[in-house]
């Protein structure tokens, strides 16, 4: 297998799904009444460990300090195809979608300084709801069907710099530009097509905002690393036709992680993350979230096996805070003498909240190249 | 490894189909805004409405009506034929002519509309002056129509007869026919169910007048046990025009023929020169109400003062014009007629050019004897006005087909505040995107 063939496959996939409109993470019905569904800032490698390896993986856009580990110009793409089943108050439905939630490119500037960038999904805003109802129109009960769809996401464009301040300490700083748009369509159609014409409203909502992040990576010993990170964002502005339709606060994000190398062919990691989504005052049912993950990577560096477990909360949902539990596993395989790596994985998520349960299978595919 | 990669590739491509729409569980898992709908009757939106007459005279109409409803209407149709030759040239290239001798004639009318629930529907044929033209009116032609009819046929009786469909008949007539004892023929058009009726006339009934250069005029009155009304095709309707055919013979002298004194039988259809119908009482003159129909045809121009909010931030899903008739249209139920609302391209009053985009037209049917409020759906037209502010927000109501009958409907105008025209608009308010 050649590097060229792998690159060709990835480019074909990119073309097949028109990435401009689908640079999003997994959607969730929980995000419809909120700002969206927060993305997972993880590469396939990190995601198949439940996200536990994200602060220690240079190709996961969670932290900036870990970029200091990049010794050569490298790039990584992540894609995921999800099959989602929804149980909303007894109504079952099945959805699916393909997303490109993350891309990272990084390279050293000096022996101590690495610069990186890329994109990831900050909030996914892709959803569609169909509502059947009967209304009284001109004294007649008229069956109607409303379909409201939103296709797009708030993307996080990042430029980051990481510096190794000491043999054991690395510092990372990132500047984030929140951008992206959603194509939104609201259609009402009537059962009486003879007398009533369907109504369709279309628009494009453009999002904008800024953010900054900082992170530290500290090697306690040669086998133990700890990481800490912090991120703050400005308000998220939603513009329609050049006019601001809404401005919403965004949460502070902070977290910590621990990684232990248990020998040459095994690593264990765990992370915890907090986000104060309840500070988004314009959303009635916003909740602060706490998320955790543990995972391990076993086997030779050229073809490791990974498994992980994650749990935590989702920021938007009526009543009590919705929860999320996930299991994941995957494989990695280096090729072309270590200049490329293909990661595949499978993830199972279950999200539960008042009146809604989602179950998601996601097939993950990642490619990392070091030209 | 390449095979595995190819399989992986196919798997992911196959999974790329997007399906993100699910049944909504509202309000908990639906967008905060919803699609709102309003239904409003704009009672003063129609203004500066006027009626104009003279668009189409009856002699340019695509049909003509014969009706007889005592106390309501007496309508009579007629036509005149072109000239008929009296001599023929028996041999091509020869200058010698011989006189013809008329044997009989056949007069055809095509009934394009008739009452289906009447009995003894009869057509009575009258000979009218060949001078009948567009200046002829009910009174000037009345003497001809009150004379004894030349012939009469019973449409219901003919329809009740068995069809004759032998090969010889079909060869001559093109289809099966029904023939009564007096030789009247009826043929049903299989495509549009129109009825072609033929009067067979002898030379006493249909004399060839040399003084009139063979031109002749025929008129029709209708009678029935009830609902006596038929609508007949005219020249403007093409193949349904009235038709006169002369049957004649002539003798070829032995000096010019190889067959001595042979007799030749022939026929000739003469073109219809003019057709029209007259009725009494005539269409009343225009007044302050809005008139649609009649003869010559009247149309009504209605101007709509669109509120600004109907131009933006809403989406019209239904728009209905509401008109209140001054009174029920009198006549025969089968003479019910259609009304068409057409946009004007530019507002020049009665001479406003009409738009040709049929998708913007609104139409309805006026039932004879009904004084109910008339609703005309103008959804596409109002939607077009809502989207394009450069369009002239006015439209014209006209009868379809125009000037084919005595029928005319009158609606209250904006001068009658209690019954003025209104526009009922159902619209969807713009969805508020951008909010969760």
Image (tube, coloured by chain):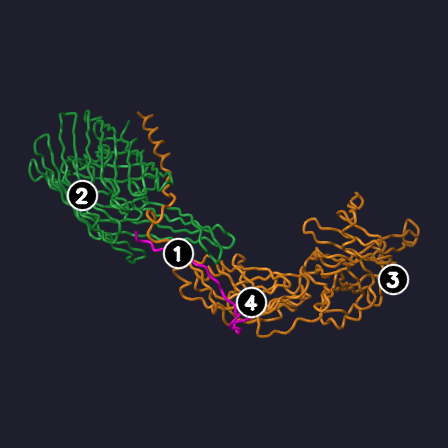
Chain colours: A green, B orange
Same subunit under labels 3 and 2? no
CA–CA distance in space, label 4 to label 3 = 53 Å
CA–CA distance in space, label 4 to label 2 = 69 Å
Circle 4/circle 2 CB separation < 8 Å: no
Identify residue for label 1.
B36
The reply to whether residue B274 is in sight is no
Disc 3 is placed on an element classified as loop
Q: Quadrant of residue B202?
A: bottom right
Crowd band around label 3 with a 10 angstrom C-alpha radius: few (<14), some (14–19), many (20+): few
Please say if B371 is above or below B434.
Answer: below
Name the N-terminal-most of marks 4 and 3.
3
Please say if A124 is above or below A336.
Answer: below
Crowd band around label 1 with a 10 angstrom C-alpha radius: few (<14), some (14–19), many (20+): few
Residue A362 appears left or right of B103: left
Residue B189 appears left or right of B301: right
Magenta part of the protein: which range?
A: B412-436
Judged by depth in the image, the label closer to the viewer, 3 or 2, is 2
Crowd band around label 4 with a 10 angstrom C-alpha radius: few (<14), some (14–19), many (20+): some
Q: Is residue A165 magenta?
A: no
CA–CA distance in space, label 1 to label 2 = 39 Å
Q: Chain of mark 2?
A: A
Circle 4/circle 3 CB separation < 8 Å: no
Q: Position of residue A72 (x, y in %)?
A: 17, 35
CA–CA distance in space, label 3 to label 2 = 112 Å
């Amino acid at each position: 297998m050649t590097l060229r063939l792998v690159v060709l496959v990835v480019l074909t996939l990119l073309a097949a799904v028109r990435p401009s409109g689908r640079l999003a993470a997994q959607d969730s019905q929980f995000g419809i009444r909120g700002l969206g569904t927060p993305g997972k800032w993880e590469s396939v490698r990190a995601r198949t460990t439940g996200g536990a390896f994200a602060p220690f993986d240079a190709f996961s856009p969670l932290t900036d300090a870990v970029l200091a580990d990049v010794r050569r110009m490298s790039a990584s793409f992540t894609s995921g195809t999800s099959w989602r089943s929804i149980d909303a108050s007894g109504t079952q439905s099945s959805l699916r979608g393909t997303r490109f939630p993350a891309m990272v490119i990084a390279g050293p500037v000096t022996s101590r300084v690495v610069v990186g960038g890329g994109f990831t999904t900050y909030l996914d805003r892709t959803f569609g709801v169909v509502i059947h109802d009967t209304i009284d129109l001109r004294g007649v009960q008229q069956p109607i069907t409303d379909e409201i769809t939103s296709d797009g996401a708030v993307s996080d464009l990042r430029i980051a710099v990481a510096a190794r301040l000491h043999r054991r300490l690395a510092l990372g700083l990132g500047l984030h530009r929140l951008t992206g748009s959603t194509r939104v369509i609201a259609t009402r159609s009537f059962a009486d097509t003879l007398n009533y014409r369907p109504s369709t409203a279309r628009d494009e909502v453009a999002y904008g905002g800024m953010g900054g992040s900082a992170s530290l990576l500290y090697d306690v010993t040669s086998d133990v690393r700890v990481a800490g990170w912090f991120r703050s964002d400005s308000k998220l502005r939603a513009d329609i036709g050049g006019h601001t339709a809404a401005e919403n606060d965004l949460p502070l994000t902070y977290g910590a992680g621990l990684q232990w190398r248990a020998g040459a062919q095994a690593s264990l990691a765990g992370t915890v993350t907090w986000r104060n989504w309840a500070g988004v005052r314009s959303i009635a049912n916003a909740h602060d979230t706490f998320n955790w993950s543990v995972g391990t990577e076993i086997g030779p560096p050229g073809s490791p096996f990974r498994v992980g477990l994650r749990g935590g909360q989702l920021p938007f949902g009526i009543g009590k805070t919705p929860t999320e539990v996930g299991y994941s596993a995957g494989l990695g395989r280096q090729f072309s003498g270590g200049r490329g790596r293909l990661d595949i994985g499978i993830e199972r998520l279950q999200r539960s909240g008042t009146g809604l349960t989602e179950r998601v299978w996601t097939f993950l595919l990642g490619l990392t190249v070091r030209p | 490894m390449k095979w595995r990669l190819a399989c992986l590739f196919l798997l992911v491509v196959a999974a790329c189909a997007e399906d993100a729409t699910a049944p909504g569980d509202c309000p908990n898992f639906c967008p905060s805004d919803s699609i709102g709908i309003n239904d409003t009757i704009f009672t003063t939106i129609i203004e500066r409405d006027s009626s104009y007459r003279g668009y189409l005279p009856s002699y340019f109409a695509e049909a003509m009506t014969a009706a007889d409803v005592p106390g309501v209407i007496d309508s009579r149709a007629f036509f005149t034929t072109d000239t008929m030759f009296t001599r023929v040239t028996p041999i091509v290239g020869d200058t010698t002519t011989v006189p013809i001798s008329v044997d009989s004639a056949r007069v055809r009318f095509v009934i394009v509309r008739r009452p289906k629930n009447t009995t003894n529907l009869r057509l009575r044929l009258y000979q009218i002056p060949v001078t009948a033209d567009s200046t002829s009116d009910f009174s000037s032609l009345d003497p001809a129509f009150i004379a004894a009819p030349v012939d009469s046929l019973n449409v219901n009786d003919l329809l009740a007869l068995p069809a004759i469909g032998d090969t010889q008949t079909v060869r001559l007539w093109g289809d099966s026919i029904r023939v009564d004892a007096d030789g009247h023929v009826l043929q049903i058009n299989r495509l549009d169910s129109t009825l072609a009726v033929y009067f067979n006339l002898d030379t006493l009934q249909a004399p060839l007048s040399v003084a009139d250069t063979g031109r002749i005029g025929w008129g029709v009155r209708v009678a029935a046990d009830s609902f006596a009304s038929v609508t007949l095709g005219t020249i403007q309707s093409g193949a349904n025009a009235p038709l006169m055919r002369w049957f004649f013979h002539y003798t070829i002298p032995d000096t010019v023929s190889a067959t001595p004194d042979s007799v030749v039988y022939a026929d000739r259809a003469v073109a219809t020169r003019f057709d029209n119908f007259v009725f009494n009482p005539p269409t009343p003159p225009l007044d302050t109400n809005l008139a649609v129909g009649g003869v010559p045809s009247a149309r009504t121009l209605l101007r709509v003062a669109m509120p600004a909010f109907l131009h933006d931030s809403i989406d019209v899903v239904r728009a209905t014009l509401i008109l209140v008739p001054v009174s029920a249209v009198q006549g025969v139920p089968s003479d019910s007629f259609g009304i068409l609302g057409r946009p004007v391209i530019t507002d020049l009053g009665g001479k406003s050019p009409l738009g040709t985009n049929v998708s913007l037209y609104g139409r309805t049917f006026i039932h004879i004897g009904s004084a109910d409020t008339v609703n005309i759906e103008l959804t596409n037209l109002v939607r077009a006005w809502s989207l394009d502010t450069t369009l002239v927000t006015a439209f014209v109501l006209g009868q379809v087909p125009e000037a084919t009958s005595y029928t005319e409907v009158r609606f209250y105008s904006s001068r009658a505040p209690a019954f003025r025209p209104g526009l009922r608009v159902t619209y969807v308010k713009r969805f508020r995107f951008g909010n969760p």
